[in-house]
Amino acid sequence: MGTNPMWWVVVPLKDTHRAKSRLGGDPGERRRLAIAMARDTLDAVRQASLVAGVVVVCDTDADVEVFTMSGTSVVVSDRSGLNGSIGFGADVVRSRSASRHLAVLPGDLPYLRASELDMALGRAAGVESGCVADRPGTGTTLLTSRAGVPLRPAYGGGSLQAHRAGGAVELGVPAWSGLRRDVDFRDDVTNDAAMNAHTRAMVQGSPWEWWGSRSNGGAA
């Protein structure tokens, strides 16, 4: 039986001063939440046994120090938009070695477990390109590309359909998995036992009750 391949994970992060605007409320609280969720996401990624390295792609120099930690390489994108930042990070990884397997994750997965990521990456080893749907089933959380296969990010409205049209195969991750629980709206933040440490500390210590009240709508 062969050994599962190791993956390099690209995590694009929007300028934390502008992140999560759809949540509404106090900008400072939103920034604290965005940072907490990103740190929880990065902790889970770094603990996954099938992850060889992590490249964090920031929009601005001001966020580099915030996300500099053991096991990560932090870079600032010179391209606009989420997909541009992902492409920048992918180029950074493969410029060091073209034989690297790539995975992309958003930085707003505060319920993610390392074991869930390992399960998905193990399945991704069997396809050229793979993807994982968000809980509503229209957006994308994880996108993968094996060595030698171009990464074609198409994040934005209806990204799951776009990624499937580009050849990505859904990896069959169950709906309850933290890998599918990204945060777009306030009622995506539920104060339950599955929430990881940084986000839990933030929402429990905040004067604003984050969970249970959707502030506005918008496309995933």
Image (cartoon, helix red, strand yellow):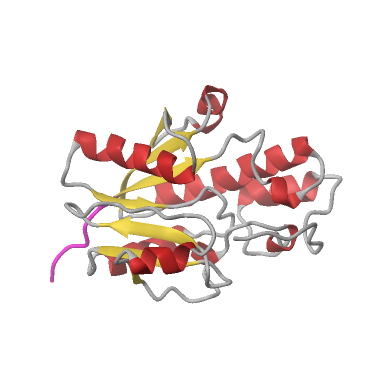
Q: Residue 122, how many percent across, how many down?
A: 29, 66
Please tell me which residue is depicted at 66% across the width and 64% down the height of the picture.
Answer: 193
Q: Is residue 139 left or right of residue 26?
A: left
What's the residue at 68%, 59% (across, down)?
218
Compared with residue 66, is residue 102 higher up or lower down, i.e. above or below? below
- The vertical placement of 86 against 162, above or below, is above
Return the x and y of residue 97 as percentages of the image width and height: 18, 39
Query: On the image, which quarter does residue 195 sit in?
Result: bottom right
For the residue pair 8 and 191, the one nearer the viewer reads as: 8
Region in magenta: 1-7
Residue 165, given in percent of the width and then of the height, sits at 35, 68
User: Is residue 154 in sight in this rendering?
Assistant: yes
Residue placed at 38% from the left, 37% from the top? Answer: 71
Answer whether residue 32 is magenta in the image. Answer: no
Taking the view exactly as shown, the residue that stands out farthest to the left is: 1
The answer to whether 140 appears left or right of 55 in the picture is: right
Q: Is residue 198 above or below residue 74?
A: below
Picture residue at 36% right of the left edge, 38% below the top: 89
Residue 119 appears in the rendering: no
SS assignment for the magenta stretch, majority: loop
Q: Position of residue 38 (x, y in %)?
A: 56, 44
The N terminus - image quarter: bottom left
Task: Please state, as top left, top right, bottom left or bottom right, where the C terminus lies in the image.
Answer: bottom right
